[in-house]
Amino acid sequence: MKHIVALAQISPKLGNLSDNLNLHLHCIERARSAGANLIIFPELSLTGYILQDLVPDIAIDPLTSPVLQPLLSLCQDIACVFGFVEVSDRFNYYNAAAYAAQGKVQHIHRKLYLPTYGMFDEMRFFAMGENLRTFETAFGQMGILICEDLWHPSTAYLHAQDGAQAVITVSSSPGRGVRDGELFHTSEGWTHLLRTTAQYFTIYHIYVNRVGFEDGAHFPGGSMVVSPGGEIVAQAKYFEEDFLVTEIDLEEVRRARLFAPMLRDERLELTLRELTRIINKRNAAR
Amino acid sequence: MKLNCELIGKVLESFIRDELSKAGFSRVVVGLSGGIDSAVSCFLAVRALGPENVRAILMPYKTSSKESALDGSSVVNQLHIKCETIEITPIVDGYFASQPDANSLRRGNLMARARMIILFDKSMEYRALVLGTSNKTELLLGYGTLYGDMASAINPIGDLYKTDIFQLAQYLGVPQAIIKKKPTADLWAGQSDEAELGFTYAEVDELLYELIDNRVSREQLIQRGFKEDFLHKVIAKIQSSQFKRRGPVVCKVSPRTVTHDFHYLRDWGL
């Protein structure tokens, strides 16, 4: 089955929900006219990234908030992944991404790994997500990861073992570290991880990173789709807004797994047994 | 310390455009000293905004070298930007008339601050932002005047070492005379950055890159051949100038203090 996917490489305004919502509506219309079945926005696409003390002011409950209604009502014949700040009934705030289809939020992923080092300070402002689940879509079984999540190999591994045929990773990843390379060091890192995880787990890996600046922190874009064989099938521009429309073909997943049936051969019990042993060893050492 | 100038140039240009337009501006003013840092900032601004949106200000003091003025003018001519010259001599001499014992450091600081006053005033006149010209080496060593040349609204070159600035200047086509001459703050006759600092930019940038960017330990740096006294001198400069890189210290007494726990970026809502 072939599906058309749109990658919205946008530059959200920091803390400006209404302008960002309008940008989303515009992009969704554009994706629909391009015949796309699915549109994906970057991490925290409705809010901007370095929110700090804005977090509680801009948070919404996606199941009850009227703010999302215009967006959800557009998601009838197109599905959408977007990023936002979720507030729970316990007043925890999550860096979250939602999958919406048929006019409703169908699935929410709460960021599991909150970078709190160097230029990052997420754990100060957000609570950690606790679950990693794939979900059923009209385009096969999918899983969402948010930025730092992917830098922990267990996440893509679990998604693949849980049945994902495609993993969607969204990010607001700043470009850092440039000397004489072709790209920022961080952009090269992303390409390695995306290609490796796609090939390791024989999945489509769909990646959407934002562009623009927040107080000089610079987001270089470079969104891409990687095939289950680990090849980049389409890539958006670096350093500027872009709107990439491309195709994924789930038949490619089947074929990749014929040639490389590692997923079938993966020994979950062995992994679990060894993990348990390691956890026990660590606990005993305390 | 090779730099991909094409990539950096592209990012810095979009930085200038993006940060400016978000704040509702389309123009910058930049103080041209005749040196390489302000030339590079100016070249970047012209690439980002076009020559019509960049206003250069030359602000000589009576003892400033003629070479500085000529080099500043060569940037203006090459970039086809508008420029005005405002002498700071009356401001500086007017003040020091009542301060006859002021040493050259006080005089140099006041000159840098007189230029800042003019740049910020001109930024109001032109509805422009002041473009910064401090590089990473200066910022780390504290080799600049607080509220003087360190003051700006946006600074495209503040994360680039002096060694990077030389490479970027070549790439951007800054006049060779500016690239080749010895770096100087030109606050008094014959002043030279490297003589004053006691080491060359090439030496210190190599050390700063390992120490700051790569976080190599002091022991390792000595093992790699950096002289211990040089290392300690540089670390002392970084530490003792930390105050220049932070705002004024506010005593925290309320539940939420603007300098301690009021965390919003400048790009808030933009």
Image (spheres, rainbow, N blue to C red):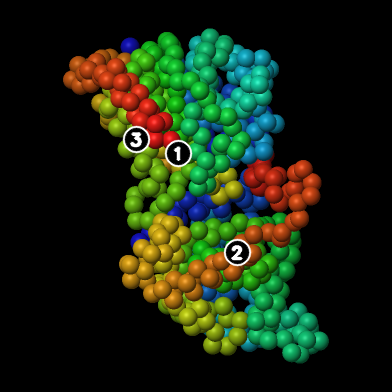
Could you tell me residue B63's position as x and y percent? 63, 87
Task: Please determine whether, in this image, residue A110 is positioned above or below residue B67.
Answer: above
Q: Which residue has dot 2 on it?
A: B242
- Closest to the observer: A245 or A69? A69
Chain letter behind tag 3: A
Q: Residue furthest right?
A: B98
Relative image position of residue A27 (x, y in whole percent): 53, 26
Q: Relative to residue A266, is residue B69 depicted above or below?
A: below
3D distance between C-alphas at marks 3 and 1: 15 Å
**Residue A221: assigned label:** 1
Q: Which residue is mark 3?
A: A193
Instruction: State which quarter of the image contains the C terminus of chain B.
Output: top right
Residue B104 falls in which quadrant of the image?
A: bottom right
The answer to whether tags 2 and 3 share a subunit is no
Quadrant position of the N terminus of chain B in the picture: bottom left
- Callout 2: residue from which chain? B
Q: Residues within 10 Å of mark 1 (few under 14, many from 20)?
A: many
Give the foreground label among 1 and 2: 2
* Residue type beneath disc 2: Gln
Q: Secondary structure at mark 1?
A: loop
Residue in the image at 71% along x and 59% along y: B249
Q: Earlier in the sequence, mark 3 or mark 1?
A: 3
Residue B169 in sight from this viewpoint: no
**Residue kind at label 1, given as amino acid type:** Gly
